Image: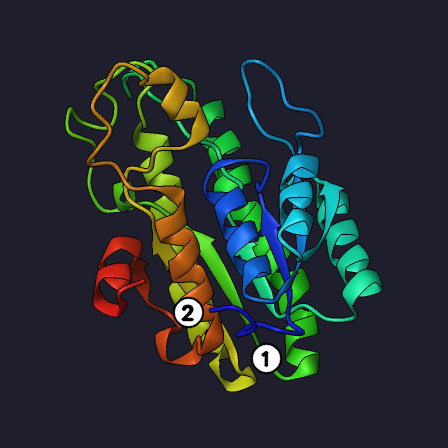
Amino acid sequence: MAGSLDGKAAIVTGSSRGIGKAIALQLAADGANVVVCGRSEQATDDLPGSIGETVEAIRAGGGTAVALKVDVTVDADLRMLVEETLTKFARIDILVNNAGLLGGGGPFLGGDPALLDAFYRTNLRAPYVLAQLAGGKMAEQGGGVIFNISSGLARMPGPNGQGGRRGGPGVVYGTSKAALDRFAAGVAAELREKNIAIINIYPGFTLTERLERLMKDADTSRMERPETTAKAVAFLSRDPMPHSGRIIVARELADEHDL
Protein backbone atom coordinates (compact mmCIF):
# COMPACT_ATOMS: atom_id res chain seq x y z
CA MET A 1 0.00 0.00 0.00
CA ALA A 2 1.67 3.19 -1.19
CA GLY A 3 2.57 5.52 1.66
CA SER A 4 1.81 3.06 4.46
CA LEU A 5 5.47 3.00 5.53
CA ASP A 6 6.26 6.68 5.01
CA GLY A 7 9.15 7.84 7.18
CA LYS A 8 10.25 4.33 8.10
CA ALA A 9 13.85 3.22 7.56
CA ALA A 10 14.52 -0.36 6.49
CA ILE A 11 17.61 -2.54 6.08
CA VAL A 12 17.37 -5.52 3.72
CA THR A 13 20.38 -7.82 3.59
CA GLY A 14 21.07 -9.87 0.49
CA SER A 15 19.02 -7.54 -1.69
CA SER A 16 21.00 -7.65 -4.93
CA ARG A 17 18.53 -10.12 -6.39
CA GLY A 18 15.80 -12.62 -5.62
CA ILE A 19 13.62 -12.39 -2.55
CA GLY A 20 15.75 -9.67 -0.96
CA LYS A 21 15.49 -7.43 -3.99
CA ALA A 22 11.72 -7.91 -4.16
CA ILE A 23 11.39 -7.01 -0.47
CA ALA A 24 13.50 -3.87 -0.91
CA LEU A 25 11.41 -2.78 -3.90
CA GLN A 26 8.12 -3.39 -2.08
CA LEU A 27 9.13 -1.58 1.10
CA ALA A 28 10.30 1.39 -0.96
CA ALA A 29 7.07 1.37 -2.98
CA ASP A 30 5.19 1.58 0.32
CA GLY A 31 7.19 4.64 1.36
CA ALA A 32 10.10 3.29 3.39
CA ASN A 33 13.65 4.55 3.00
CA VAL A 34 15.67 1.43 2.19
CA VAL A 35 19.28 0.45 2.74
CA VAL A 36 20.09 -2.14 0.09
CA CYS A 37 23.05 -4.29 1.06
CA GLY A 38 24.91 -7.29 -0.23
CA ARG A 39 28.26 -8.42 -1.58
CA SER A 40 27.47 -7.95 -5.29
CA GLU A 41 28.45 -4.52 -6.55
CA GLN A 42 28.47 -5.73 -10.15
CA ALA A 43 26.26 -8.24 -11.93
CA THR A 44 27.94 -11.12 -13.77
CA ASP A 45 26.82 -13.64 -16.36
CA ASP A 46 26.61 -16.30 -13.65
CA LEU A 47 25.19 -14.08 -10.92
CA PRO A 48 22.55 -11.57 -12.08
CA GLY A 49 21.75 -8.47 -10.06
CA SER A 50 23.68 -6.04 -7.89
CA ILE A 51 22.99 -3.68 -5.01
CA GLY A 52 23.35 -0.76 -7.41
CA GLU A 53 20.73 -2.16 -9.78
CA THR A 54 18.28 -2.59 -6.92
CA VAL A 55 18.80 1.01 -5.83
CA GLU A 56 18.36 2.21 -9.41
CA ALA A 57 15.06 0.33 -9.66
CA ILE A 58 13.83 1.86 -6.40
CA ARG A 59 14.77 5.38 -7.45
CA ALA A 60 13.19 4.88 -10.87
CA GLY A 61 9.93 4.16 -9.04
CA GLY A 62 10.22 7.34 -6.99
CA GLY A 63 11.61 5.71 -3.86
CA THR A 64 14.59 6.47 -1.65
CA ALA A 65 17.43 4.00 -1.24
CA VAL A 66 21.17 3.72 -0.71
CA ALA A 67 23.50 0.82 -1.48
CA LEU A 68 26.11 -0.56 0.92
CA LYS A 69 28.52 -3.40 0.23
CA VAL A 70 28.25 -5.72 3.22
CA ASP A 71 29.53 -9.19 4.04
CA VAL A 72 27.22 -10.38 6.80
CA THR A 73 29.86 -12.77 8.14
CA VAL A 74 32.08 -9.81 9.06
CA ASP A 75 31.04 -8.10 12.30
CA ALA A 76 32.73 -4.85 11.32
CA ASP A 77 30.58 -4.73 8.18
CA LEU A 78 27.44 -5.20 10.27
CA ARG A 79 28.42 -2.39 12.62
CA MET A 80 29.14 -0.18 9.62
CA LEU A 81 25.75 -1.05 8.14
CA VAL A 82 23.90 0.07 11.26
CA GLU A 83 26.02 3.20 11.67
CA GLU A 84 25.58 4.25 8.04
CA THR A 85 21.83 3.65 8.22
CA LEU A 86 21.58 5.91 11.26
CA THR A 87 23.75 8.54 9.60
CA LYS A 88 21.56 8.54 6.50
CA PHE A 89 18.07 8.08 7.97
CA ALA A 90 18.52 8.64 11.77
CA ARG A 91 16.49 5.54 12.65
CA ILE A 92 15.96 1.84 11.98
CA ASP A 93 12.37 0.62 11.92
CA ILE A 94 12.57 -2.54 9.82
CA LEU A 95 15.38 -5.10 9.57
CA VAL A 96 15.10 -7.95 7.08
CA ASN A 97 17.70 -10.68 7.58
CA ASN A 98 17.50 -12.21 4.12
CA ALA A 99 21.14 -12.95 3.22
CA GLY A 100 21.94 -16.62 3.60
CA LEU A 101 23.74 -19.67 2.33
CA LEU A 102 21.73 -22.23 0.38
CA GLY A 103 22.85 -25.73 -0.50
CA GLY A 104 24.98 -27.92 1.71
CA GLY A 105 23.89 -31.05 -0.13
CA GLY A 106 25.62 -34.38 -0.13
CA PRO A 107 25.52 -37.22 2.38
CA PHE A 108 25.89 -36.63 6.10
CA LEU A 109 28.33 -39.50 6.56
CA GLY A 110 31.72 -38.35 5.38
CA GLY A 111 30.66 -34.71 5.18
CA ASP A 112 32.93 -31.89 6.31
CA PRO A 113 31.88 -30.38 9.68
CA ALA A 114 33.32 -27.07 8.47
CA LEU A 115 30.23 -26.79 6.28
CA LEU A 116 28.09 -26.58 9.40
CA ASP A 117 30.28 -23.76 10.71
CA ALA A 118 29.90 -21.82 7.45
CA PHE A 119 26.11 -22.18 7.38
CA TYR A 120 25.73 -21.22 11.02
CA ARG A 121 27.94 -18.17 10.56
CA THR A 122 25.80 -16.83 7.70
CA ASN A 123 22.33 -18.18 8.48
CA LEU A 124 22.29 -17.81 12.26
CA ARG A 125 25.17 -15.77 13.67
CA ALA A 126 24.82 -12.90 11.19
CA PRO A 127 21.08 -12.39 11.91
CA TYR A 128 21.83 -12.70 15.64
CA VAL A 129 24.53 -10.01 15.59
CA LEU A 130 22.61 -7.67 13.30
CA ALA A 131 19.43 -8.06 15.35
CA GLN A 132 21.43 -7.08 18.46
CA LEU A 133 22.89 -4.02 16.78
CA ALA A 134 19.67 -2.81 15.15
CA GLY A 135 17.51 -3.91 18.07
CA GLY A 136 19.40 -1.62 20.42
CA LYS A 137 18.45 1.37 18.31
CA MET A 138 14.87 0.15 17.94
CA ALA A 139 14.58 -0.06 21.73
CA GLU A 140 15.80 3.54 22.07
CA GLN A 141 13.29 4.85 19.53
CA GLY A 142 10.32 2.91 20.93
CA GLY A 143 10.04 -0.14 18.71
CA GLY A 144 10.59 -1.82 15.38
CA VAL A 145 10.36 -5.14 13.59
CA ILE A 146 12.95 -7.74 12.65
CA PHE A 147 12.22 -10.28 9.92
CA ASN A 148 14.22 -13.44 9.34
CA ILE A 149 13.76 -15.17 6.00
CA SER A 150 13.73 -18.81 7.06
CA SER A 151 12.63 -21.99 5.28
CA GLY A 152 10.19 -24.85 5.57
CA LEU A 153 13.24 -27.12 5.41
CA ALA A 154 13.74 -26.15 9.05
CA ARG A 155 10.90 -28.53 9.83
CA MET A 156 11.26 -31.31 7.29
CA PRO A 157 13.72 -32.61 4.69
CA GLY A 158 13.37 -32.08 0.97
CA PRO A 159 11.54 -34.60 -1.23
CA ASN A 160 14.55 -36.92 -1.49
CA GLY A 161 15.91 -36.35 1.99
CA GLN A 162 18.01 -33.37 2.87
CA GLY A 163 21.27 -35.07 2.06
CA GLY A 164 20.00 -37.21 -0.78
CA ARG A 165 20.60 -34.88 -3.73
CA ARG A 166 24.03 -33.59 -4.59
CA GLY A 167 23.84 -29.80 -4.55
CA GLY A 168 20.35 -29.78 -3.04
CA PRO A 169 19.59 -28.29 0.36
CA GLY A 170 21.34 -30.49 2.89
CA VAL A 171 21.13 -31.31 6.57
CA VAL A 172 23.23 -28.28 7.48
CA TYR A 173 20.91 -25.86 5.66
CA GLY A 174 17.76 -27.11 7.38
CA THR A 175 19.53 -27.26 10.72
CA SER A 176 20.70 -23.65 10.43
CA LYS A 177 17.17 -22.48 9.60
CA ALA A 178 15.69 -24.48 12.48
CA ALA A 179 18.13 -22.72 14.79
CA LEU A 180 17.08 -19.38 13.29
CA ASP A 181 13.45 -20.18 14.10
CA ARG A 182 14.31 -21.03 17.70
CA PHE A 183 16.41 -17.88 18.04
CA ALA A 184 13.53 -15.72 16.84
CA ALA A 185 11.01 -17.31 19.20
CA GLY A 186 13.22 -16.72 22.21
CA VAL A 187 14.21 -13.17 21.38
CA ALA A 188 10.63 -12.22 20.50
CA ALA A 189 9.57 -13.08 24.04
CA GLU A 190 12.38 -10.99 25.52
CA LEU A 191 11.85 -7.93 23.34
CA ARG A 192 8.06 -7.77 23.38
CA GLU A 193 8.09 -5.32 26.29
CA LYS A 194 10.27 -3.01 24.19
CA ASN A 195 7.73 -3.06 21.34
CA ILE A 196 10.14 -4.90 19.04
CA ALA A 197 8.61 -7.68 16.97
CA ILE A 198 10.54 -10.60 15.50
CA ILE A 199 8.85 -12.57 12.73
CA ASN A 200 10.21 -15.45 10.66
CA ILE A 201 8.95 -15.95 7.11
CA TYR A 202 8.76 -19.16 5.08
CA PRO A 203 8.82 -18.09 1.40
CA GLY A 204 8.26 -21.54 -0.10
CA PHE A 205 10.12 -22.84 -3.16
CA THR A 206 10.66 -19.53 -4.94
CA LEU A 207 11.63 -18.84 -8.54
CA THR A 208 14.54 -16.41 -8.24
CA GLU A 209 16.64 -15.13 -11.13
CA ARG A 210 19.26 -17.78 -10.51
CA LEU A 211 16.75 -20.64 -10.46
CA GLU A 212 15.03 -19.22 -13.52
CA ARG A 213 18.26 -19.70 -15.45
CA LEU A 214 18.82 -23.18 -14.09
CA MET A 215 15.22 -24.26 -14.73
CA LYS A 216 14.59 -22.53 -18.05
CA ASP A 217 13.20 -25.73 -19.61
CA ALA A 218 11.18 -26.81 -16.56
CA ASP A 219 7.58 -26.09 -15.61
CA THR A 220 7.85 -23.44 -12.91
CA SER A 221 4.20 -22.44 -12.85
CA ARG A 222 3.64 -23.83 -9.34
CA MET A 223 6.67 -22.17 -7.79
CA GLU A 224 6.32 -19.10 -5.62
CA ARG A 225 7.48 -15.69 -6.83
CA PRO A 226 9.67 -13.35 -4.77
CA GLU A 227 6.89 -10.77 -4.75
CA THR A 228 4.73 -13.00 -2.54
CA THR A 229 7.24 -12.83 0.29
CA ALA A 230 7.83 -9.13 -0.36
CA LYS A 231 4.14 -8.33 0.01
CA ALA A 232 3.96 -10.39 3.20
CA VAL A 233 6.87 -8.49 4.75
CA ALA A 234 5.42 -5.11 3.79
CA PHE A 235 1.98 -6.06 5.13
CA LEU A 236 3.37 -7.28 8.46
CA SER A 237 5.56 -4.17 8.81
CA ARG A 238 2.46 -2.00 9.24
CA ASP A 239 1.35 -3.69 12.49
CA PRO A 240 3.94 -6.28 13.48
CA MET A 241 3.46 -6.83 17.22
CA PRO A 242 0.44 -9.17 16.99
CA HIS A 243 2.59 -11.52 14.89
CA SER A 244 5.79 -11.38 16.94
CA GLY A 245 7.33 -14.77 17.68
CA ARG A 246 5.40 -16.44 14.88
CA ILE A 247 6.50 -18.25 11.76
CA ILE A 248 4.50 -16.94 8.81
CA VAL A 249 4.10 -18.86 5.57
CA ALA A 250 4.12 -16.14 2.93
CA ARG A 251 1.65 -17.83 0.59
CA GLU A 252 -0.87 -18.45 3.37
CA LEU A 253 -0.72 -14.81 4.48
CA ALA A 254 -1.05 -13.60 0.89
CA ASP A 255 -4.11 -15.76 0.33
CA GLU A 256 -5.70 -14.76 3.64
CA HIS A 257 -5.35 -11.03 2.99
CA ASP A 258 -5.54 -11.05 -0.80
CA LEU A 259 -2.08 -9.55 -1.15
Q: Which residue appears at 30% of the width and 14% of the height?
A: 166
- What's the amino acid at mark 2? Leu
Determine whether 8 is above or below 179 in the image. below
Q: Which residue appears at 19% of the width and 36% of the height?
A: 222
Which mark is drawn over residue 143? Answer: 1
Q: Is residue 130 visible?
A: yes
Residue assigned mark 2: 236
Q: Which residue appears at 44% of the width and 28% of the height?
A: 209
Q: Position of residue 183 (x, y in %)?
A: 43, 59
> Counting other residues with Cα less than 10 Å from the Cα at mark 2, is it few (<14), some (14-19), or many (20 or more)?
some
> Is residue 179 rendered to the left or right of residue 15?
left
Q: Earlier in the sequence, mark 1 or mark 2?
A: 1
Q: Position of residue 161 (x, y in %)?
A: 18, 27
Which residue occupies the foreground of this view, 188 or 87? Answer: 87
Pick the quarter of the image with the C terminus: bottom left
Which residue is most to the left? Answer: 159
Q: Position of residue 257 (x, y in %)?
A: 27, 69
Residue mark closest to the camera, 1 vs 2: 2
Q: Quadrant of residue 49?
A: top right
Q: Quadrant of residue 221?
A: top left
Q: Position of residue 247 (x, y in %)?
A: 31, 61
Determine whether 21 is above or below 181 in the image. above
Q: Is residue 104 visible?
A: no
